[in-house]
Image: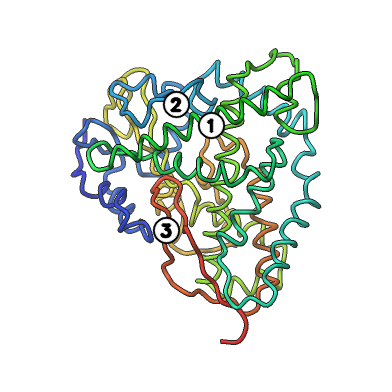
Amino acid sequence: MTTTQTPDTLRRILDYSSRADPYPLYAELRETPVARQEDGSFVISTYREISDILHNPHLSSDTRNLSCPTEGMRAEGTPAFINLDPPEHDRLRRLAMRHFGPPHTPGLVTGMEGALTTAVGHLIDDFAGKERIDVVDDFAYPFPVAVICHLLGVPREDEPRFHRWVDDLINSIDYNPKTDPKEKLDKGVQARKDLRQYLGGLLERRHGHPGDDLLSRLANDDGPDGRMTDEEIVATANLLLIAGHETTVNLITNGMLTLLRHPHVLQRLCEEPDLVVPLVEELLRYEPPVHIIPWRAAYSDITVAGTTIPKGAQIMLMLASGSRDPNRFHDPDRFDPDRRDNQHLGFGSGIHLCFGGPLARREAQIALGQLVRHLDRPRLVADPPPYRRSPVLRGPIHLYVEQGAA
């Protein structure tokens, strides 16, 4: 059986006019869990089917396995391991994890607790005397950027340069040749080249000079799997630099927006600091930073929910839709930090489960916990706020909040 769905629902989701609230459209999508589009691609929108796909060894994350990749999908240079399949993916992920988390570096995140708290405190101190702040520019962006720069060994003064590159890269992720100007793609391609060249220059200076930063460790490490090539290190650093702050910016910003829309939960968090742990998990389900995995490809014909997906067809996974699936979550459109059995798709699942998830969680926990306790009677200036263009990495581009006397 092959199910064809009118492309109108997906088109409306991808259209910027739906960015503030795509969730009713996701409900429409779920009426057809696996839907073939006019271009031959497939959209998967329900929890069970998305989870099955993410754990299916017959699915590829490598765009080279797509029958008809678009220009925006073509990788420049060596792909990052997120866009590779086993065994290449597994080897590179193991090499990176040796320096990023357990079992070889188990104390990385916990060892940063003091520095994370201090960084948040400095940003909050700057709010003193301000009646209006932008949660994005004044807080949610500079915090994770400082963290990932520190981890990688990127000079903080270079941040404005890669801020511009990352913006152009993110904007080009969902490039559609039918509707978008070629300039959007060109800027993304150039930004990718510039960022890789920049990281390559930093890496070159690390060889033979071991240090505590991740670039130094990768450049000078000879573990059981050998050493990454320079091209592989640059691709990994590029991935961490983008994913290491873009998703966390959205998680913190979406979190603060959600709390301001639910003042009783905000007050609870002020009174019950430990609530922040399940609260962030519920945010990852309810308002996740990543809404869509734009592509997977099948190695061979597969059947999902009775629908045949042919070899090489593009598969789009609607993660945010799956995390609001009423067949998996009770009352899914309600924000409930006390929710039990919250196995959301906020960080994906399977072998590509978000590499930096533990760090992003802790950054969001510290950021939101401190922010709600130090803002004075915060209130939204505009609801909905203005959103970023991307439907893939979804979050406000600005979140203006007033504090103090109304």
Q: In the picture, which quadrant includes the C terminus?
A: bottom right
x and y percentages locating residue 374 in the rendered image: 70, 72
Q: Tell me the CA gap for discs 1 and 3.
A: 27 Å
**Residue 237 falls in image quadrant:** top right
Residue at 56% from the left image edge and 42% from the top image edge: 161
Query: Which callout, 3 or 2, points at the residue further toward the start of the chain?
Result: 2
Are circles 2 and 1 on residues that touch, CB within 8 Å? yes
Question: Height in image: 220 above or below 31?
Answer: above
In front: label 3 or label 2: 3
Please state the horizontal and vertical placement of residue 388, each as a whole percent of the image.
42, 54
Q: Residues within 10 Å of mark 3 (few under 14, many from 20)?
A: some
Q: Does residue 175 sit above or below 18 in this rendering? A: above
Residue 193: give its label.
none
Residue placed under numbered mark 3 in the picture: 387
- Res 352 label: 1
For label 2, the residue is 61
Identify which amino acid the numbered label 1 is placed on. Answer: His
Residue closer to the observer: 16 or 312? 16
